[in-house]
Structure formats: structure tokens, C-alpha cells
Image (spheres, rainbow, N blue to C red):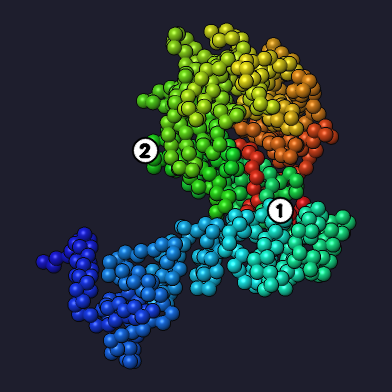
């Protein structure tokens, strides 16, 4: 019977062979060739060299003089690199460091050892930073390493503000430096930094470099620099004052700024960053068949440029099935939470809350950040760059139970930690952040004393969490127990508007739609009652806020932050409810509400758990909605803009390529150059 060795036995066989060869080299047994590099000698075996290096294999089998020579001299190869490569051959260990990786890569390239060259490339990719990316880029370009060259070029451009502070950039030769500052892709927010870098580069070796100043200045987009800065640059730098061509160039730029007639120069990459409205999530319906490839994208809108873009959807492929909520962190990271797709859920043992992050600086796609124990009706908050999943309703042994658990996810450490629990179980509550503290407001709490009656009671509690001490404190309670309210932070205070609730603690009394406004002062730990709204406000969004601040004032439109809602005029006494076009504006200076301009038509938000609006540059924008009080009427695909100074709504975009339904609207600073452009026919229509 034929015997076949198992995989583990084969591995042991290979290991034994390697150990024997290594021992023979250490004992100088059967040495048949000596490599010489920088006058240092390395005894070894031809067979081993030929097995690892096509260069040596060709040398030892070509029939030329090297086949019989005892010593082989390696010109232009560092001795230290030869030692590292021989250690790899005989010990299966490649000892790389920041100091030797480029020299080892050069030696591997010379010896045609693609596996070692690939390991060196990956090492440089993993250890790339602002201090070395320029050197890596130049090295990769010289060696023809396309992947490393592209990745280092992208890193160099995206981190150019940091790169320009390091000495490496000042050591470039004139041609390399000129090529670098010509790029549109440099991530700088102001052209002044490019001018400053040019002057630093020249002053590094003025006698040798001042002759290049006029040519370099021609690549600086002086028309994007303030005239005051240009005048100061002339005064401070004798290199500029000594060059008549530079003086003339700066004077012409100042004149062009004062009397703009020609088109402005192209903006650098970093200058194009702007606030965008992100309508995240998608329902495949509503996209015309000729644009079907946009069905897996999420709609974006640039209010300043009046342009539409798209980003990949977190629902794409095996991503999220439902986006429940989202936040934009302090460092502008876009994060959403929801449930996995049905296909993924069928393969998972447990149902989880899935959290995804949009990767702006990488490949512009959503990446799964983490998961946490499944729950519903939770709140998602953030302090600095940490996420908090607070409370909610969990399914335990086929029962839905309201929980008090709080989980914190550190984006920097990529880890979850269960922190101090809430003082009471809560669901359907709201979370806001103020002064680096989390505040949990209202919601449902289990009824313990009379469980056979109504299962849940409303909460009027306000809970404060201090991340530095990992401690919750109960603060002054609200006058009304409530849920489905709107909450916002304005001028260092918390505003809670409307909702469904009752006066005082919930003891079973009648609940109603509220028009009350309660304002919390954290310094004095007290609530005061603001002027009531003219109409009761019912926020259908149960896990977030739906009122927002614009230009120092609160804007509330129907039941949503700018997206209509179902309500009634005056106090709710059972009269007919309808979709509202009402806009109410609260002025904190005078402590009063005034009626704002009505929306062009009554609108109901696209989803009952979402807001369809956001504030950008002091204006309020509403993205889509339903005309009418039910979900069977006309879907609007317009972008509405409310300008507080003009006190009127404007339709700024019509028939946009938006899904019939999306999950959440967020505002984030992004670069349109990283986004998916709209279809050419829609650009032509605009």
C-alpha cells in the first residue's frame, strides 16, 4: 500500500532540512561559494543561493566563469543587506527595520527575489508616516514598484500639511520639488502654506536655489492668497525682493484679486472640503432604470455648489440591512449603526447591532467597525471620538426586556468596554452631548410595582454621564414624563420640545401630545419652562433628536427637524391630525417663538425613524419627503433651503436621483473629489 505523508509531516520534513542546512553553514561544511560585498565575505552554498534567487541560478548554470569561481563579488549591494537576505534563506526570518528596509529591498530587487521585495514593500506600507512617505515614494518610483509608489503618493498628498513640516521635503532637488508643488491633489486648506514652503526650500540653500525661485513661484496659486499675506511675504523675504520677476508676479496677483476677470486657479484637494448633506441608506425603489447602477449608492448634496454626488451605501453587498441611527464624531468620522442583511443574519448565531464607519481617506467605502449585543430602541451618542450605545430593549430568552447597560467603543483602541450602567432601565430615550458629558433624557422604563397593568411607564429623568469618572448622576427631573420628543443643545443648555407624555411622574394618568418646551441649565442643575409652541410636536423619531439650531435659533418644522410631521393646530383635543407645513422658530435672546415661513407644501419625513434635514452654513435643508398625511401619496424628490435672512423657502434642486426612502440624514465635512459623480445625463440636465 502506498503511504502519503500528512501536511504536518511535510512541514516537519521541511523544517528538518532547513535546520540541517543551517547547521552545515554554521559549521562551514560543504561551503562551495563565498559572496563578497563591501569587502565582507559570506560563506554559503550554491544550491541554497540558486534555490532562492533566479539571479544566482542563472549565474551558476550559465557556463561562464562564475560557475567555477570560489568568490563572487556583489557590486553596489550593501553588506548588511546581504547578511539579512542570507539569514532569510537559512533561518526563514527576514529582519527588517526602518533603517535597513530600503537597502534590503534594493538588494532583493538586484537578486530578483520577488518574495523578499514584496515583504519589504508591505513593511514600508505598514510603517508609512509623514516623516518618511516622501522618501518611500521616491524610492518606489525609482524601483518601479507600482503599488508602493501609488500608495505612498496618495499618502504624501493626503498628509501634505504634515509632510511639509519635515526636513525630507526640503532635501528634494529642484525638479522633484517643482513637480510636487504643481499637484492639484495636495491636501492643504490654504495656499499660503505652499508659498511658505517654497520660501523655506529656497532659504535652505539660497546661493544654489534662489535662481529657481521665479519658476517655483509660477506654480504657487498666488490668486488664492490674501493680498495682505503676499505683501508681508515680500517684506520678510529678501530672496523675493532681490528678484524683479517675483515682485512683478506678486503685484499682478494682487491686482487680479482686486479685479477678478479671469477664472480662479484650480483649488488644491484640501481646499475643496465642504459640508455635505448625506442621505445614508437606501431602498432600491425610486431609481430610474437607466440609472440602476446608482441603486446601491447613497445620495449626497453640496448646498454651496448646488451639486449632487453619491457615496457607496452601508447596505451594499453584505453590509447593513437597516440603518437605525448615525453620528458624526468630533474628528468628522461618519458612523452608522443598524442590523445586518437578512442573508448575513441567517448565517449568524446571534443577532447583533452592527456598526460601520465610512473610510474617507482610504478607498472611500464603508468598513465594519464593530458589533455589540443586539437591542432595539437604544440611543447612540458620542463624546470626543468614543461611541456609546445606551440602554434599549433586548431580547433575552424570547422575552423583550428593557436594559440599563451602556457599552462604549473606542475608535482609537478598536475595543468595546461595558461602562457604568444607567441608574434605571430605559428605552426610546434621547441622548445629547454637552460639555463632554452625555445626557440621557426621558424614554420608557419598566413598571415594577404593577407589572400586570401597562407594561412600561414614561420617564421624566435626566441622567448625566461623566466619561472621565465612569459615573452616572441623576440630575433634576423634567416636569413632564415623555418620549418621542425633540432634543437639541443651544447656547450651553438642553432644549426638550414636545413629545408624548404627562405631567410629573407617570402613574397611569392620561398621555397626550405636548406643546411644552423645557430648558435645562447644567450649571445650576435646574429646568425652566420655555414659551409653549403654537402646535403640539410629535417626533416620530424614537432614537435621536429632531430639532436643530441654525444661526443661534431653534427651528422646528412639524414633527421633524425640517421634514414635516403629523400634528394638529393648537392643543390636542382630539381634532383632525394632518401633515404640517408649519415652521416655528425659537429665539433664546427674547425667549419667544415666532412663526417661520411655511414650507412650500406639507411634508412628511421619508421614514418614521428618521430626519430628512440638516443645517449647513447657517441654512436649513430638507431632502425629499412625502406630500400628504399618509405614505401613499406623492413622493417629493426636491431639496428645500430655508434662508433665515430671507425668511423664505427656496427649491434648490428638483428631480434629484434620490431613493424613495433612506434611513438617516447627516451633515459631515467631505471632499467632493472623493465621491461618486452623478450620471452624465443628469449633469447635462442641470
Residue 177 placement (x, y as % from top left): 64, 68
Q: How many marks?
A: 2
Q: Residue at x 55, y 10 (%)?
A: 506
Please tell me how crowded label 1 is: few (under 14), some (14-19), or many (20+) other residues with Cα within 10 Å: some
Badge 2 or badge 1: first in the primary sequence: 1
Residue ranking furthest to the left: 1
Q: Classify mark 2: helix, strand or loop.
A: loop
Write down the residue under mark 2: 349
Q: Residue at x 68, y 18 (%)?
A: 517
Q: In this view, does 154 lie above or below 297?
A: below
Q: Classify mark 1: helix, strand or loop.
A: loop
Q: Nearer the viewer, residue 502 or 138?
A: 138
Question: Where's the N terminus, which quadrant?
Answer: bottom left
Q: Is residue 35 above or below residue 676?
A: below
**Marker disc for residue 190:** 1
Residue 153 placement (x, y as % from top left): 57, 63
Q: Which of 244 and 373 is in front in this view?
A: 244
Residue 428 placement (x, y as % from top left): 54, 24
Residue 557 placement (x, y as % from top left): 72, 27
**Relative horizontal placement of residue 637, taking residue 381 as reference (left or right):** right
Amino acid at each position: 500500500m502506498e503511504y502519503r505523508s500528512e501536511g504536518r509531516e511535510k512541514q516537519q520534513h521541511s523544517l528538518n532540512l532547513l535546520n540541517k542546512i543551517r547547521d552545515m553553514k554554521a559549521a562551514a561544511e560543504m561551503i562551495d561559494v563565498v559572496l563578497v560585498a563591501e569587502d565582507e565575505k559570506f560563506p554559503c552554498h550554491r544550491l541554497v543561493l540558486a534555490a532562492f534567487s533566479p539571479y544566482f541560478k542563472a549565474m551558476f548554470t550559465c557556463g561562464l566563469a562564475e560557475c567555477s569561481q570560489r568568490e563572487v563579488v556583489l557590486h553596489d549591494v550593501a553588506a548588511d543587506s546581504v547578511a539579512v537576505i542570507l539569514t532569510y534563506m537559512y533561518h526563514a526570518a527576514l529582519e527588517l527595520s526602518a533603517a535597513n528596509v530600503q537597502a534590503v529591498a534594493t538588494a532583493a530587487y538586484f537578486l530578483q527575489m520577488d518574495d523578499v521585495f514584496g515583504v519589504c514593500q508591505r513593511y514600508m506600507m505598514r510603517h508609512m508616516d509623514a516623516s518618511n512617505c516622501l522618501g518611500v515614494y521616491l524610492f518606489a518610483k525609482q524601483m518601479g514598484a507600482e503599488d508602493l509608489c501609488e500608495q505612498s503618493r496618495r499618502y504624501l498628498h493626503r498628509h501634505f500639511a504634515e509632510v511639509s513640516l519635515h526636513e525630507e521635503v526640503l532635501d528634494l532637488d529642484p525638479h522633484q520639488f517643482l513637480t510636487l508643488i504643481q499637484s492639484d491633489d495636495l491636501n492643504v486648506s490654504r495656499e499660503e502654506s505652499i508659498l511658505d514652503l517654497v520660501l523655506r526650500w529656497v532659504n535652505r540653500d539660497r546661493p544654489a536655489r534662489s535662481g529657481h525661485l521665479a519658476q517655483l513661484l509660477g506654480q504657487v496659486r498666488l490668486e488664492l492668497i490674501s493680498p495682505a499675506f503676499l505683501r508681508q511675504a515680500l517684506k520678510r523675504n529678501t530672496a523675493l525682493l532681490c528678484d524683479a520677476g517675483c515682485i512683478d508676479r506678486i503685484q499682478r496677483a494682487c491686482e487680479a484679486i482686486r479685479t477678478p476677470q479671469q477664472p480662479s486657479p484650480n483649488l488644491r484637494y484640501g481646499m475643496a472640503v465642504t459640508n455635505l448633506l448625506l442621505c445614508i441608506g437606501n431602498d432600491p425603489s425610486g431609481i430610474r432604470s437607466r440609472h440602476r447602477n446608482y441603486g446601491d449608492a447613497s445620495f449626497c448634496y453640496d448646498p454651496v455648489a448646488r451639486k449632487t454626488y453619491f457615496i457607496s451605501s452601508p447596505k451594499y453587498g453584505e453590509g447593513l440591512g437597516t440603518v437605525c441611527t448615525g453620528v458624526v464624531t468630533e474628528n468628522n468620522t461618519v458612523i452608522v449603526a443598524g442590523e445586518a442583511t437578512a442573508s448575513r443574519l441567517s448565517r449568524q448565531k446571534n443577532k447583533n447591532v452592527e456598526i460601520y464607519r465610512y473610510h474617507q481617506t482610504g478607498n472611500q467605502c464603508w468598513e465594519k467597525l464593530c458589533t455589540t449585543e443586539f437591542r432595539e430602541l437604544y440611543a447612540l451618542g458620542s463624546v470626543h471620538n468614543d461611541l456609546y450605545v445606551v440602554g434599549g430593549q433586548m431580547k433575552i430568552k424570547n422575552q423583550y426586556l428593557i436594559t440599563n447597560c451602556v457599552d462604549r467603543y473606542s475608535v482609537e483602541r478598536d475595543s468595546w468596554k461595558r461602562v457604568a450602567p444607567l441608574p434605571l432601565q430605559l428605552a426610546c430615550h434621547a441622548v445629547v452631548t454637552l460639555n463632554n458629558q452625555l445626557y440621557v433624557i426621558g424614554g420608557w422604563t419598566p413598571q415594577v410595582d404593577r407589572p400586570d397593568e401597562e407594561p412600561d411607564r414614561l420617564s421624566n429623568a435626566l441622567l448625566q454621564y461623566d466619561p472621565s469618572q465612569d459615573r452616572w448622576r441623576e440630575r433634576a427631573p423634567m416636569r413632564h414624563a415623555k418620549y418621542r420628543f425633540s432634543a437639541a443643545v443651544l447656547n450651553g443648555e438642553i432644549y426638550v420640545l414636545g413629545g408624548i407624555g404627562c405631567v410629573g411622574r407617570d402613574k397611569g394618568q392620561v398621555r397626550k401630545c405636548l406643546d411644552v418646551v423645557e430648558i435645562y441649565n447644567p450649571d445650576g442643575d435646574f429646568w425652566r419652562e420655555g414659551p409653549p409652541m403654537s402646535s403640539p410636536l410629535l417626533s416620530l423619531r424614537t432614537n435621536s433628536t429632531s430639532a436643530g439650531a441654525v444661526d443661534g435659533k431653534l427651528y422646528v418644522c412639524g414633527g421633524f427637524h425640517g421634514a414635516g410631521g403629523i400634528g394638529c393646530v393648537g392643543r390636542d383635543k382630539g381634532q383632525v391630525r394632518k401633515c404640517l407645513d408649519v415652521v416655528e422658530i425659537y429665539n433664546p435672546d427674547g425667549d419667544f417663538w415666532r412663526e417661520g415661513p411655511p414650507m412650500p407644501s406639507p411634508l412628511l419625513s421619508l421614514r418614521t425613524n428618521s430626519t430628512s434635514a440638516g443645517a449647513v452654513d447657517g441654512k436649513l435643508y430638507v431632502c425629499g419627503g412625502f406630500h400628504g398625511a399618509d405614505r401613499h401619496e406623492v413622493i417629493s424628490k426636491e431639496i428645500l433651503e430655508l434662508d433665515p435672512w430671507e425668511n423664505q423657502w427656496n427649491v434648490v434642486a428638483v428631480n434629484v436621483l434620490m431613493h424613495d426612502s433612506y434611513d438617516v440624514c447627516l451633515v459631515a465635512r467631505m471632499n467632493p473629489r472623493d465621491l461618486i459623480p452623478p450620471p452624465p445625463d443628469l449633469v447635462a440636465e442641470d
